[in-house]
Image (tube, rainbow, N blue to C red):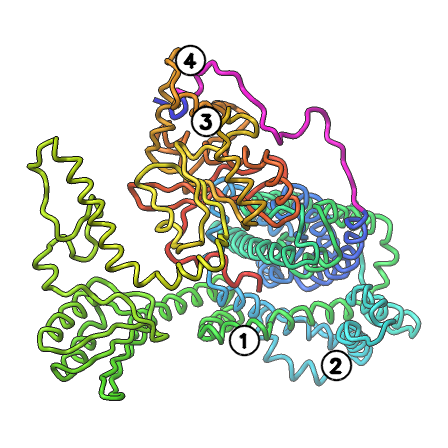
Amino acid sequence: MTLCTPARTTNRPRIQRPHSPPEGPRRFRLAGADVSASIAVFLIALPLSLGIALATGAPLQAGLVAAAVGGLVAGRFGGAPLQVSGPAAGLTVVTAELIQRYGWRTTCAITALAGLSQLALSALRVARSALAVSPAIVHGMLGGIGVTIALAQLHIVLGGTPQSSAVDNFLGLPAQLARAHPEALAISALTVAVLLCWPRLPGRAGRLVRKVPAALVAVAGATAAAAFAGLAVPRVDLPSWSSHALPGLPEGPVLGIAAGVLTITLVTSVQSLLSAVAVDKLVAARGDSGRGIPRSRLDRELAGQGAANLVSGALGGLPVAGVAVRSVANVSAGAVSRASTMLHGLWIVLAALLLVPVLDLIPLPALAALVMVVGIQMVNITHIRTVTRHREVIVYAVTLTGVVLVGILEGVALGIAVAIAVSLHRLARTRITREERDGRHLLHVRGQLTFLAVPRLSRALHQLPRGSDVVVELDGSFMDHAAYETLSDWTTGHLAHGGTVETTGPSGVRIADPAPVTDSASHPCCRPWTPWHNHQCGEEPTGTAEPAETGQMTGLRLASGIGKFQRNTAPLVRDELARLAREGQRPSQLFLTCADSRLVTSMITSSGPGDLFTVRNVGNLVPLPGEESGDDSVAAAIEYAVEVLQVESITVCGHSGCGAMQALLNGSPDDPPSPLRRWLRHGRPSLERMASRRHAWARIAGRLPADAVEQLCLTNVVQQLEHLRAYEPVARRLAEGTLTLHGVYFHVGEAQAYLLSGTDEVHGYDDVFTRVMPTDHLETARAS
């Protein structure tokens, strides 16, 4: 049975979403901010593209081709609207090595094949996997590439020719310094001086002139100085476009070419995706908070980069990637759409066709000095401080050294190996110390408590005097079963001998003590990780009760549960609830979910009292405005949460095995009317969305749903988010940028939450639910 057969055979009419784009052709609108931003980016990209082409040993026109393609193709089809793509300094070493080994035409073919690989990866939706790479490895890779670039370009700055490797370039520096060319050195020194001093010009006049990019001023100044002084230095020589080299069939060993394709694919993909995440953070931090600018869709961005590399390679251009320098300039210049990126590509095309005589005046040492400074800046002091603060400087150093001495792939592999070793070391390294303070024995456990630390933990615990007052301070975020049992067994024995045990966290706050074995012996259900099924500790099972007694038993169980709350839990939460009573409720989000008894909202979201404004109904439905037929409870809750409580986000949470969705699938127009059927009519748009060919099937963690019920449960979450946008208060807050919408799917059997991926400016959501990891390390520290 196919997944959507029940929905596709329905005869119900389709409905159009309230916020669907109007019918008819869309008009292209060009904002003035995009035009000015595109000019600023163009002025930076032009000299950088020529300099990177020079550094790789490729034809200089190849840099212009890559810049134009990056703007027009990646700008149009990519998923990061304000990211600017083009030839990147991070690819200089890779491209130079490929050109030296296989020639230019084969390198173009390798670039095109890398583009095809990126398109395949985007189809598999693996873009976010690139974000799992440690920032220390990424920064180390970029730092190593920067060192290699700087060493190579320093030879051209001195009037010489670089060698094939960073080691040879370093060893050849003394001889190159001895025979430095004064003219080349003077032009290079002027370029570097302007690059460093231009951003630091003081005063009001300085603020005005700093709007002109430093790279453009440096290269233009060096060009003018060389022309007026009549210096004999090599200059740019752009050949006729009629003789431009296009790719040929790859020639060389298959494994070598495959390694080249893999290297370009990985470097361009990781650099572009990390840059896209950083651009999102820059946009959010801008004065307008990025209002109206959608967040990056990483799989689409990967596809856009693949298409750009395919086209660039086919047209004889350098590999293309998202470039941080140009992207930062684009965001800072106030760009509001992808039009700025595309216009910058158009300006590159016009310059390559009309400004050839002007470009031929640029001295090559000026371009080499420009790229050398960019390479030095890739060894970022801020990055080094960050990885040092996170105790990952050894990963950074090994990656950087490996890239310089061996190569990019080898250096990254070394960095990954060291990062894994550091993680394992941290997991196994546990410090246990003892001290006596004010008559109490303090046992301080710092680090993760795993089975590897159990022998030392047991030894330290049994060295404590019997009958003493003990405080166990746990300064870590993880304790496995073996460590828990060791601590629990020792606690039971110590209490039996008249001692006291208090377990605290790193700040001294008391935490739940391990359950004594005596309690477990009397009530076996109280062991750790007990199933929750009607769990009532200390009560005898009632399997032999008569049906007439069941209601009475249930009432007693309810009263017993309330009594346990008053006795055990209320003293712990009384202060917090008293504060909430005084200050009123200030929830951060509206959480709209199903009435299913298996959904515990505070548990799923790890939230406490006052954090969530929760609305439950059958099927987690959001009726369209005006369609509740006398029952405005959901609309009232939405209005109250958005207008009065000023929540920052609204979450719609569906779940697996939803009975309301099963009823929708199995229902028919001939069913007798009932309150449940009248309510479920608000879910019919979800059925129609699932049956519509205009919408892609929802996917969950890269796979299709297991059956039609799960398909409808996922689709229903997406559809109810669309309904939310139809509410005037929600639409207004979304336009202001002060409210966000989220979709969550909770798989009850797996105890796993899945988060709906980001939005698109036209189609809303891309109907892909991704797994929420136990430790959210995917989006942190990526702005750098």
Q: Residue 683's mark?
A: 3
Q: Is residue 28 magenta?
A: yes
Indicate whether 701 appears above or below 175: above
Quadrant where the C terminus sits is bottom right
Q: Residue 497's mark?
A: none
**Secondary structure type for disc 2:** loop
Report the mark closest to the observer, 2 or 3: 3
Q: Residues within 10 Å of mark 2 (few under 14, many from 20)?
A: some
Q: CA distance from mark 4 to mark 3?
A: 14 Å
**Secondary structure type for disc 3:** helix
Q: Position of residue 316 (x, y in %)?
A: 68, 48
Q: Which residue is mark 4?
A: 669
**Secondary structure type for disc 1:** helix
Residues marked 1 and 4 touching at CB (< 8 Å): no
Q: Residues within 10 Å of mark 4 (few under 14, many from 20)?
A: few
Q: Position of residue 513 (x, y in %)?
A: 23, 67
Toward the viewer: 537 or 205?
537
Counting residues from the N terminus, which is met first, the one under dot 2 or under dot 1?
A: 2
Quarter holding residue 444 = bottom left
Q: CA distance from mark 2 to mark 1?
A: 35 Å
Indicate whether 683 appears above or below 514: above
Residues marked 2 and 1 touching at CB (< 8 Å): no
Residues marked 2 and 3 touching at CB (< 8 Å): no
Q: Is residue 314 magenta?
A: no
Residue at 35 percent across and 51 percent down: it is 603
Q: Which residue is mark 1?
A: 385
Q: Position of residue 250 (x, y in %)?
A: 57, 47
